Structures are given as structure tokens and as C-alpha cells.
Amino acid sequence: MSGEQYVAVVGPADASEADIAAAYATGAALAARGAVVICGGMGGVMSAVAAGVRSAGGLCVGLLPGDSREGASPDLTVALPTGLGEVRNALVVRAADALVAIGGSWGTMSEIALAVRSGRPAVAVGGWQVVDASGSPVDGVIFAGDPGEAVEAVLALPSTDA
């Protein structure tokens, strides 16, 4: 297992078509580069990234919120029920060396915050931006223009060896 990067890809279950396309492309590109992808395992961005990973012959682990595999993306390589609900967001982040966030939602924002707080690099494609009281962007997240740029950025970062 040494040498592989584990990358969490997060984003909203209720995702736009652009976010779905970006997630699929991100998953395929990460898998093609040998990364293990971790996600929340359900719909929207999570399902699209799993489909992208599968299309490239990669490994995608889904950490599910419920007690069963019901509703999990059919494209996951491994589906792990946690029974933790949204608290599983912390597991998704902690199991990874780095995070790619696609799109924006409160759950996605929580995962970005957990990554930044735990010292894991975070790269965002679209989505929300946090600004301070003066309107200046808050440090901690690298913003990428597209999935290819996000994958290059996250794989160029030093591994946290989670």
C-alpha cells in the first residue's frame, strides 16, 4: 500500500450537472494516476466520482452514513456502512491524505473545514468560498479551475500518510 495516495472527493448529493461531470472526470483522472478514492458513497457527486473511478479501473471506497449498504452508489468498489450519519464526514476526511471538493453544500463545507483543521490539503473545484469580515478569502483551500487542475494540484501535494 505504500506510495498510493488516498484522496477524498466530496460534494453535494443534490449536485448540478456541471458538478456531476466534474466529479466523474476527477474520479477517472485520480484512478488513472493510481490514487485510492474515498467518498461518502451515496448520490450526486459521490456517485459520479465512483463511476469515474470505476471507468478507469480504480478503487473507490464509500463510507456510508447508514447501517446498511442500501442506497449506496453501485459503482463503489467497497461500501462500508458506518451508522454515523453526517458524522461520517470526519471519517471520509481522516482516511485521506488530501481532499478534493466539488460544488458546494453545508456537508461539503464541513468536510473542507475538517480537512483544513486536520492539516490535510484541500482543493476545490467550484463551490463556496469562505471570506473573512473584510471580504478577503480565508487561507487553507487551493482553488482549481477544472478537474484536471484539481487532480494535478492534489497529487503534487506531499502525502500526510493518514
Image (cartoon, rainbow, N blue to C red):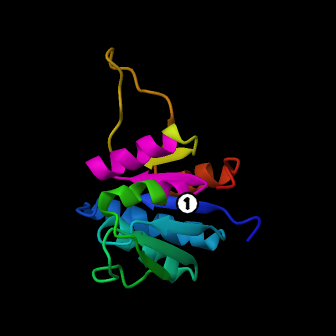
Q: Is residue 102 magenta?
A: yes
Residue 10 against residue 124 in the figure, above or below? below
Question: Could you tell me residue 60's position as x and y percent?
Answer: 51, 75
Please state the horizontal and vertical placement of residue 48, each as a whole percent of the image: 38, 72
**Callout 1 amino acid:** Ala
The residue that appears at 61% across and 62% down in the rendered structure is 6
Image quarter hosting the C terminus: bottom right
* Highlighted range, magenta: 92-116
Task: Name the residue at the top extreme.
Answer: 134
Q: Considering depth in this image, is 151 or 104 the residue closer to the camera?
A: 104
At 50% from the left edge and 74% from the top edge, which residue is drawn? Answer: 61
* Residue 12 falls in image quadrant: bottom left
Estimate the x, y position of residue 156 in percent, counting from the top left. Answer: 68, 50
In this picture, is 112 found above or below 92?
Answer: above
Image side of residue 64 versus residue 57, left or right: left
Number of numbered callouts drawn: 1
- In the image as oriented, which residue stretches furthest toward the right? 2
Quarter of the image for the N terminus: give it: bottom right
The residue located at (29%, 67%) in the rendering is 44
Q: Is residue 6 visible?
A: yes
Write the residue at 57% across / 57% down. 151
Q: Secondary structure at mark 1?
A: loop
Give the crowd class for mark 1: few <14, some 14-19, many >=20 residues within 10 Å. some
Q: Nearer the viewer, residue 100 or 87?
A: 87
Q: Is residue 162 left or right of residue 25?
A: right
Residue 3: x %, y % from top left: 76, 64
Residue 142 in view (yes/no) = no
Q: Is residue 22 magenta?
A: no
Is 83 on the left or on the right of 1, as rendered? left
Q: Which residue is mark 1?
A: 95
Q: Is residue 103 above or below residue 45?
A: above
